[in-house]
Image (cartoon, coloured by chain):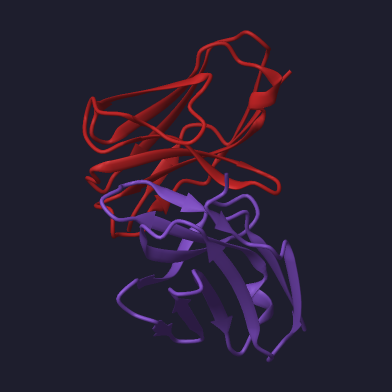
Chain colours: A red, B purple
Amino acid sequence: DVKVTQSSRYLVKRTGEKVFLECVQDMDHENMFWYRQDPGLGLRLIYFSYDVKMKEKGDIPEGYSVSREKKERFSLILESASTNQTSMYLCASSRDRNQPQHFGDGTRLSIL
Amino acid sequence: DQQVKQNSPSLSVQEGRISILNCDYTNSMFDYFLWYKKYPAEGPTFLISISSIKDKNEDGRFTVFLNKSAKHLSLHIVPSQPGDSAVYFCAAIGYNNNDMRFGAGTRLTVKP
């Protein structure tokens, strides 16, 4: 069965901290994605990657960076966390563009 | 600028009746459309999809209709069941793109 695992379900950090959100998929998928979900805004794409060491900006990349050193792992980095980055973060993967994305259960991140 | 819009934040229907969830898009380059279902504290799960070469796709109780000229798609659930209560997101993928755009979601409540 398809599995996307996000390292934390809940995370609380302080303003200015560097925050790492980890995502691992076991399906040998080429594409991986990071979204944030906010009320009334749905899912907004932060970054995606279609291959190891490759990354593309989504709609809202400001304040974030990503790393994909291995095919199965895609990390989202908040370089200096701010309160407006408090949100639900969702990781997803897909085999190719016309295949549905498989999502992890999300990380609810609170920045104090 | 939201390219995929779900204008109804919520919908309530009686068990056994039809649920109709609507979605509009603005980008004529979108050629593949999906519906996802999301329960609280879980990631979205894929429900049904449709390619732009079709105008209807059916899977059990779920049918998706696509009207390309109106840039509109809808999800019909017949008959609705209490277990269908969730947030439904429509999503679209553009031609030659790997990234997906989501609507803001519609919260469906099916009353017993």
Extreme top residue here? A16
Indicate the position of residue B105 as horizontal and vertical percent values.
63, 58
* Residue located at (68% from left, 24% from top): A84
Indicate the position of residue B86 as horizontal and vertical percent values.
65, 65
Relative to A79, is B12 above or below? Answer: below
* Quarter that holds the C terminus of chain B: bottom right
From the viewer's perspective, tell me whether residue A79 is left or right of residue A15. Answer: left
From the viewer's perspective, tell me whether residue A112 is left or right of residue B80. Answer: right
Indicate the position of residue B83 as horizontal and vertical percent values.
64, 75
Q: Nearer the viewer, residue B23 or B16?
A: B23
Identify the image quadrant of residue B54: bottom left
* Residue located at (68% from left, 11% from top): A15
* Quarter that holds the N terminus of chain B: top right
Q: Nearer the viewer, residue A109 or A49?
A: A49
Identify the image quadrant of residue A99: bottom left
* Residue located at (31% from left, 29% from top): A55
Task: Please tell me how many numbered marks the rendered image carries.
Answer: 0
Identify the image quadrant of residue B66: bottom left
Indicate the position of residue A92 as horizontal and vertical percent values.
41, 45
* Residue located at (69% from left, 90% from top): B17
Relative to B57, is A5 above or below? Answer: above
From the viewer's perspective, tell me whether residue B40 is left or right of residue A76. Answer: right
